[in-house]
Image (tube, coloured by chain):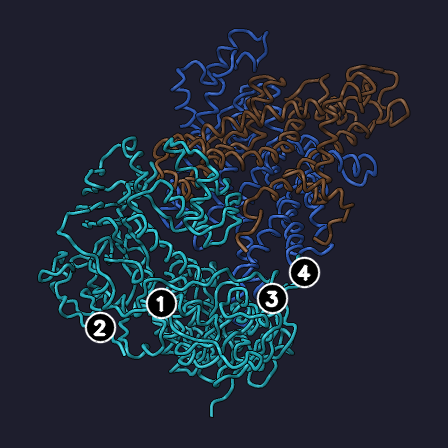
Chain colours: A blue, B brown, C cyan
Amino acid sequence: MRTYLLKRFAMTVLVLVLVIVYLTLLVHVVPGDPAKSLLGPRANPDLIAKTRAAMDLDKPVLVQVGNAVWKILHGSFGTDVFTGRSINELVGSALPHTLILAWVSLGLAVVIGVPLGVYSATHPDSWLDRITAVISISCITIPSYVGGLFLLLLFAVKFKVMPAIGLGEEGNVLDYVTHLILPAVALAITWVGYLARLIRASLLEVLNQTYIRAAMAAGLSPRLIFFKYALKNALIPMVAVLGVGIGNLMAGAVFVELIFSRPGMGTLIYNAIQGRNFPIVRAGVLTVAFLFVAANLLADLAYTYLDPRIQLDKVRG
Amino acid sequence: MQYVARPSSRYQQFLNRIPILGDVLRQPLGALGSVIVLVFMLTVLLAPVLAPYEYAQQDIPSMLQGPSRAHWLGTDHLGRDLLSRIIYGSRIALGVAIPAVGIALAGGVVIGLTAGYAGGIVDDVTLVLLDSVQAFPAVILALVILALLGPSLVNVIIVIGLAWTPGYARITRAQVLSTRQHQYVEVERSLGASQKRVLFLHILPNVVAPLLILAAMDLPVVITFEAGLSFLGLGVRPPTPSWGVVLSDGFNFIRHSPWPITWAGLTLIITTLGFTLFGETLRDVLDPRLSGSRGT
Amino acid sequence: MTEKILQVKKLEVKYHTREGILTAIHDASFDVDEGEIVGVVGESGCGKSTVASAVMRLLPPNGQISGGQMLFRGKDLCQLDEGGMRLLRGKDMAMIFQDAMTSLNPVFSIEQQMIDAQKARMPATGQKGQKALRERAVMMLERVGISDAARQIKEYPHQFSGGMRQRIMIAMALLSNPALLVADEPTSALDVTLEAQILELIVGLRKELGTAILYITHDLGVIARLCDKLIVMYAGNIVEYGDVFGIFDRPKHPYTQALLRSHPSHSVRADRLRTIRGRVPSLRELPLGCKFAPRCDLAGEVCHGTEPDFLLVDRRYVLCHAYGRAWGEAGPTVTLPSETRRPAAVRTLERTGSGDGVIVKTVQVRTHFRDHVAFLGQVMGQTGGTVRAVDGVDIEIRRGETLGLVGESGSGKTTLGRTILRLLDPTDGTVIIDGQDITRMPQSKLRPMRARMQMIFQDPFSSLSPRMKMASILLEPFRIHGLPVDDPKEKVDELLATVGLSSEQADKYAHQLSGGQARRVGIARALALNPDILVADEPTAGLDVSVAAGVLNLLKDLREEFNLAYVIITHNLNVISFIADRVAVMYLGKIVELAEAEYLFTQPRHPYTEALMSAIPIPDPRLRDKIQHIILEGEIPSARNPPPGCPFHPRCRYAEERCIAEVPRLREENGSQRLTACHFPERVQFRLSWD
């Protein structure tokens, strides 16, 4: 067990270092001077030289990579050349909004999707099961940006019952929540359908297992069999999927944040890309990648906790 | 199967004569998906015939109109006919999706076959590299690369291909490993077959079949992905009528006209739904675990 | 006066399927008395498991009890609602399943599951109640032979071996001391030695707790060892029902007779096994009249036309027209197969000096597997272990001879078989095929030779490519070796005919064949190029007795016809006794005994062989008390770190200091042809006793 965790952890660190290396090298793959494209073609050469120095571009490539890895592993993304603010601070102010959005969406998806799936699995081939199947597939096929635009159009533009943009008034929790509803729903739609189908499939499989029959033969009550013996087994694949899910939700957040003009990682990265501000792009992307990898690691750990078999079988280098 | 409608027996006979598609059409949802896919394909083929206007033909005075006899779906902010733009958009959707999935498929098969067949250190290194590419959510990866390469149709295809390659590589590798375990592969060796014969005649077909199903199911995902990138202004550039571009234009004028968003959004949803239903039914039909029982 | 625990009267079970309503059980009546073991036997698809599920009222959702009564201590189970049934289950009735691997919930500890099982009946209050439940669970585990139960109970199912899991299942089932235990093939997935352990346990528990047992199995040997009464099922009907001794002694129903005759047994050696033509009909196409009539040698007009009655003849129930009034004077002639002979009369191969005609020879062959350690693991200082699957084996096989390789799973017998054919590369030692050393021969040179050495693989289905029709599978050997076939269709027909299949099979895919047919195609493919050597891995695994008999007869015929050298790998000792001339017994990668089948079965010299022989379930209930049952303790150790000295010493009843210190050599005993690797072979006293 300990070797497994150690290995898994070492793997994660290795992957993250590789990610930093890619992001640092990426500037050199494309033609043109990153400092020039950041400052625009008419910037004066002095400023460009200074910026190049600030971005480490004047040093050999290997040193750049080494420096980047070193600094970032020590928790520093450097300073924004434009505003002079620490990039950490920029990321720090954007990140919580994205995290809240992603987690609330995920929560919504679980709260709606799991009961739907459980109902379908316990009433297979009933009318409601078939309707649920159609709804689930339809949900899966609605991209977050289309969902977001439709919600915006319907509730904010047409009926004007919901706020359209922004985070709401600062310090006003209720306002923050009302501003969160539409984006969170837009982001959750796909996952509601996905989880419903996943839970249905895995529950149906579990309910067919011999150990469920054995539990019935032992005279256990149907409630105990279903909610304890079957559901725990059926939730295991969901946990693995949620690890990937949280990453995808953060990616989907790019669209939703732009549509609803919410500050967050998506907006930060998008604006930085538009402004060719490469250090910020790198910091933002790295943060997202880090959270993505961390979510996967957490899901794996939860998996290990839920499924005692895993410690032995799933050791991979 | 009680819920299957019972069409005429001639229809049933017709279905019996088509090997795989017949089974897809037998399922109500599969039939619905097939119809949508068919309509989509016809639209792609016949776009110039079907579209009432040129997709870039501007008519500023009649901008942002709702549906009318002249413009069935209305017009956008430059007075361009929405129906025509959406019809031509289908060409962009498919024109990006097919080569992009093709690139991913080809790259994935090569990488996966190499890793799975070579094993050892090659396999280990490949896995770490795949892991590190997959550490980026696909949208983010695409955003960064497109930002550097600059938005264009070709770049979008390349980026999507790149973002999808690791997934295919992993599945290919897993398929190679599991197929190598199949006893009939060892049987071939015991009969005296060469490595090459085993690889090309027995392993490759088993690897490729599930990948093709997966590719079919990835088409709608890639279509929405491309539209999303174009919506962000990082994919296909205006005036090329990608559905994402129509959405993006509509978003800018959301307070003036709901129509561009409504139509482009619905088109995306229905297309995706069609391909997904078709792909899922196809997978169920082809899944060897479900097809036919042993003995009796 | 014994109490009747279960009385089943005219039970009928139906399945609702897409093809319509199928009758799975028809008109079944039997009793289970207190403390009695009633066996239910039959081939797959005959409805034995359905009977087990019906009694527990655990039929799948599409199954329905459509008629009859099941009186459990006088209470009709068919009339009970689900709640009432639940009160009985786990308290008065319990069930154990075939696959202990999947019948325990993987994500809960044994303790949790055993406590839940008890709580279902008596809600435990507070910590004290919880503790009592736990103590009872631990006690039960100890009773079924789980060592250190108080600690082991915290573990999860995957941490136990298959045999241990079956013990845990039994412990769980017996927690409440039920009056009736339904056992659905509980030992079918286990090795003989483990099966013997579990059977011993069941017999002991029955004696101790007085539990009545309804025991479902396909193995007549197990029935003979265990049961008091026997129910023989065919196509959803009980065809014969009565005292087990009576049925084995004088089977009345033609199906019972055929079943008993097709069972290979080392106590009665035969040149050929009786087979039953045709196969069990599917429920969809049940014949009219007697269900067995199409396969019955005695069947007359009446059998095909009307259903027979369940007749009481000599205190036994038989479902056969031949015992009814309509049959007339002459009853059915029941004779045991005339070709049956006693062991002494069996032909032994003429030996003409060693070395002559030797076609396969191995010298100190070793095949070890190293664990793969990924590079990250290597960086972190992990090193892989070594599995010594085959560890120094010398064998010689002559033309026309059959060598049997036996041993428990994990003994290395399959690895040896593959190494002989160079499907695996030996780590050390030499493999010589027909005078040529192939140990290090490059694959390119080896490939042409493969035509002469073939293998029949264990799983008949997975050894046939799912994407190819049988015709093309059978022509594959010719294509591989670039041999032109003049008339492919005729060649395929010829090959199919060799293994007794009709030419219509040529157009089928693997999933359209039955197990026996798939196995035969595998044999036909192996024979296509007229090999000299054939290695068969578990050639009858997973086949019903009558089908297995057909395959064994075929192998035997083909050997005579083509003068093949066989290596038959199996854990089924009855199969070996039927087909092998010499037998090598393997344990942890080494041969511990090598002798003529004759001597090995009657006078084993190695303690391991002795235990194996005594563990074989012999289909003769009269022998159950005559044979000394030597129960091996524990399970075969891992080949990663085999015990020092004699690998068998930890489980050996005769072991001494010397066995731990010194590895016994495989040596000849005073000039005889038999070899034994044991320090004290004279201590082995086991003899198969005859009446």
Q: CA distance from mark 1 to mark 4?
A: 39 Å
* Residue B209 x, y percent position in the rendering: 53, 36
* Residue type at numbered disc 3: Arg
Q: CA distance from mark 1 to mark 2?
A: 21 Å
Depth check, mark 3 against mark 1: the one in front is 1
* Residue C150 x, y percent position in the rendering: 36, 70
* Residue A310 x, y percent position in the rendering: 43, 51
Q: Which mark is residue C195?
A: 1
Q: Quadrant of residue C249?
A: bottom left
Closer to the chain start, of discs 1 and 2, is 1
Under tag 1, what secondary structure? Answer: helix
Q: Which residue is mark 2?
A: C687
Q: Which residue is mark 4?
A: C20
Left/right placement of residue C361 relative to residue C631 reads: left
Q: CA distance from mark 3 to mark 1?
A: 35 Å
Left/right placement of residue B233 relative to residue C552 reads: right
